[in-house]
Structure formats: structure tokens, C-alpha cells
Amino acid sequence: MEKAALLFAIIDNAIDGIITIDERGKIESINPSACKLFDYIPDEAIGNNIAMLMPEPDKAQHDEYLEPYQRTGKAHMIGIGREVMGLKKDGTIFPFRLGLSEVQYSGRKIYTGFIHDLSREKEAEQQLRDYAVQLEREVDDRTMSLKATVKALEEAQAHLNATLDKEKELGLLKSRFVSIASHEFRTPLTAITLSASLIGLYAEPCNPTGILNHVEKIQTGVIGLTAILNDFLSLEKLESGKEQPAFHDFDLVKLSEKVTEEMQVLAKQHQNIIYQHTGISSIINLDRNLLKCCIVNLISNAIKYSGENTFIDFNTEISAEGCTITIRDNGIGIPKADQKHLFEAFFRAHNTGEIPGTGLGLNIVARYIDLMNGSVNFESDINHGTTFVILFPAA
């Protein structure tokens, strides 16, 4: 009796449903878990055919299955677990795993079904399938979007390459034109300069003032045009990478004194260029031609943008830290709004008015100084002049 009580207690408290039927398929017992699973109370299920718990087509085929098994003894489900569908009292169909066993008891056969609800597992599986489908759809969408982006990038790259090729071609054409035009202009300009000088010499004995004035204008115009062509040639060399510094030792003081003498000739009436040098030495290691071009350009600007009866300070210093070159004028100055653009090619300050210029000089100066590993800075106030400082650190 104790063993029977223990067995009933185990069955009544089992997590899975347990149902027993007789040889005709009628329910003989049903434990609480099975009642809860199918939403029936024991009195509603016991005595009824087990088919009441099955949806179609299993309901119609169940009795047909029992008869051949009892006749032949060949089973398709007994002893083998399988997934089947169950029918609740309210008509809801749900999945479960069914395990069947046969027991011989008191001269008759009893079939026991062990029922494990698979609703949660199937719901989780369905969620996983839905998530996988959604993920695949998102991957497809992302892939299509990525392909479209890659295609757009490839098209943009192709367009950019074509544009760059055209730009390179135009750049080469421009460089060739500037180089050819500049050289072709310089030949007749040289002849004009020489002829103007000779005219002046031939006219001196007669002292014809008008002729000499026109000769001077011709010479001044030729010098200005030559300077413009030189700027274009310098820019072309810089753009094409042909300009490379040639470092060697030379005397900075001698170079500066020569530049001062040459530029003083071009100064306005009563303009004076005052040169001073301080330091432990006068020898530096730079590109002499590039440095001379920078100094000439800055002094030329000081002359151009300063009035008559003014001073232009030109100072050089060599110390243990390096070389410093300072050029200071008392000219018109540079507006604050224009100062950030000062070293850009073809830029001219708004207060230059009718003063001639190409806007290339300071751009070339800055690039030459950079080629020689130096730096250039400036300070300027409107109507109070401008100071340029070139620094070359010690080697």
C-alpha cells in the first residue's frame, strides 16, 4: 500500500502530463499536469475516448491505429517518442512530445502516455526563425545599400579620376604656356631695354629732355613687365616641383649690401634703405639665389607701399639660434581682414588701390623660405607700416 501511495503521489506531482487508456482507447486516468495542459477536470476526461484530446486528422485515425496494432502487434508509436499536436478544451491546438508505453496488468493491456508540453520551445524556435528571417532581410537590405554605396563611390572615383586627369592636363598646358610665353616675352623685352638705353646714350649730347623722359618710362615699364614674367616663371617652377634649393655657404652681409645698393636705385624720392647686421658671423648656409629673391621682393614691396621721405629698415642677425632677417617700412599697412590671406597666390590687399602688382610675390617668398626650412611672419597696422621677419634655425 505504501508503494502504491508513493506511486500515486509521484504521478500526481509529475511536471509532465500522464494519461492511461485501455485497449479501446478510453481514458482511465489523467494526472493534474495533463488536466492543466488540456484544460479538463478528471471527470470530464475519464471514460471518454482519448481522441477527444486530438485535433484532426489524428482524431479520426486514432481508433484505426489501435485495431491493427492489437491484431498484429506492430506499433508505430509505442516505445518511440514523437512530436504530435494536442487539442485543448477551448479548441486551442498546441504541440507536445508524446512517449507511449504498454503495460500488461490483471490480464489486460493498459497504454500510458507521457506528455511534455513543447509550446514554449516551439514559440522560441519560431521567434528564432522570425529573427533569422528578419536578420537575413536586414543583411540583404544592408548588402544592397552597401553595393549601391560602393557603386556610387566607384562612379565618384571614376569621375574624380577623370577630373584629376583633366586638371593635370590643364596644369601641364598652363605650365607650358607660362614657360613659353614668359621666355618669348623676355627676348623682345631685352631688346627693348637695350634699345631704350642706347637711345638715351645717343640723346645725351643733345640733352633733349622729352626723349630722356620717354626713355625712362620705357625702361620702367620693361622692368615692371620683366618682374611680372619672373614671378610667373617662379610660380610655374614651384607648381611643377622643379624649384629645389641648392644649399651652400656664402656671406650674408655682402649679399645684403649688394641688394641694398641695387634697391636704393629703385627707391622713391628721399626714400632711404638702412641696412645693419649684428651677430657672431656673416656666413650662412642657404640657397643664395632664393634668399636674394625673397629679400628683393620684400624690399620692393616696402618701396612700393611706402611714400617719399621715408625710411626702410633692413636688418640681418646671425646667432647661435640661427639667422633672422627683418624688413620694416612705414607704409600703408595691411588691413586686419586681409592679413590671413596675405600669402595666398594672386591675393592683393584691398587698400593697394592703383599700385601695380600680381599678388604672387609674397606667395613665392613664403614657398621659397619653406623650401629652405625657414619661416616668415609679419606684423602690420594701417598707415603705420609693416614688419616682415624671416627666421632660419641653426643647422
Image (tube, rainbow, N blue to C red):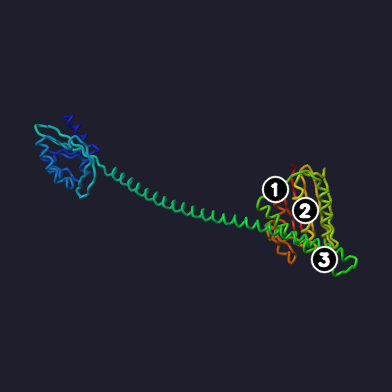
Q: Of the numbered discs in the image, which one, if any, rests on residue 79?
A: none
Total numbered circles: 3
- Residues at circles 3 and 1 in contact by the CB criterion of under 8 Å: no
Location of residue 331 (image quadrant) = bottom right
How far apart marks 3 and 1 lie (CA) works out to 38 Å
Tag 3 residue:
215
Mark 2 packing: few (<14 Cα in 10 Å), some, or many (20+)? Answer: many
- Residues at circles 3 and 2 in contact by the CB criterion of under 8 Å: no
- The foreground one among 85 and 294 is 294
Mark 1: amino acid = Gln
Sequence-first disc among 2 and 1: 1
Q: Of the numbered discs in the image, which one, if any, rests on residue 295?
A: 2
Tag 1 residue:
244
Sequence-first disc among 3 and 2: 3
Mark 2: amino acid = Ile
Residue at 26 percent of width and 42 percent of height: 118
3 or 2: mark nearer the eye: 3
- The foreground one among 345 and 100 is 345
- The foreground one among 58 and 116 is 58
2 or 1: mark nearer the eye: 1
Let me know if residue 235 appears in the view. yes
Q: Position of residue 26 (x, y in %)?
A: 12, 41
Mark 3: amino acid = Val
